[in-house]
Amino acid sequence: MAEWLGMVKDVGFPIVVTLYLLHRIENKLDELNASILALPGRLIDTSGQQKQDAG
């Protein structure tokens, strides 16, 4: 905690808030990237199931 207070004093509050938000959003961006990469496979599976249901 002391190092965070030192950072606030040295570099300023806006920079610390920005770093905190970037750290927080990193996990969400990783999940979003994984979802986007998996999307083509899911679309192929869905279109294949629809063709089987229609036939």
Image: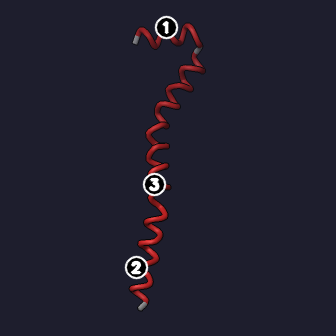
Closer to the chain start, of discs 3 and 2, is 3
Is residue 50 positioned above or below 34 on the image? below
Query: Can you give x and y, in whole percent of width and height, for residue 46 in the image?
Result: 43, 73
C-alpha gap between disc 3 and disc 1? 38 Å
Residue 35: image tag = 3
- Name the amino acid type tagged 3: Ser
Tell me the kind of residue under disc 2: Gln
Circle 2 SS class? helix
Where's the C terminus, which quadrant? bottom left
> Is 14 on the left-hand or right-hand side of 21?
right
Question: Would you name the residue on which mark 2 appears?
Answer: 49
Callout 1: 10 Å neighbours few (<14), some, many (20+)? few
Disc 1 is placed on an element classified as helix
Q: Earlier in the sequence, mark 3 or mark 1?
A: 1
Q: Is residue 38 left or right of residue 14?
A: left
Name the residue located 53 percent from the left edge and 25 percent from the top edge: 19
Write the residue at 48% across / 55% down: 37
Q: Are marks 3 and 2 in contact (CB under 8 Å)?
A: no
User: Which of the labelled discs sits on residue 6, or is there none?
Assistant: 1
Q: Give me the disc on residue 33.
A: none
- From the top left corner, tell me how far across and down residue 23 is, in percent: 48, 30
First in sequence: mark 1 vs mark 2: 1
Q: Position of residue 8 (x, y in %)?
A: 53, 12
- Picture layout, residue 41 above or below residue 48: above
Residue 15 vs 40, above or below: the answer is above
Q: How far is mark 1 from mark 2, CA to CA? A: 58 Å
Element under disc 3:
helix
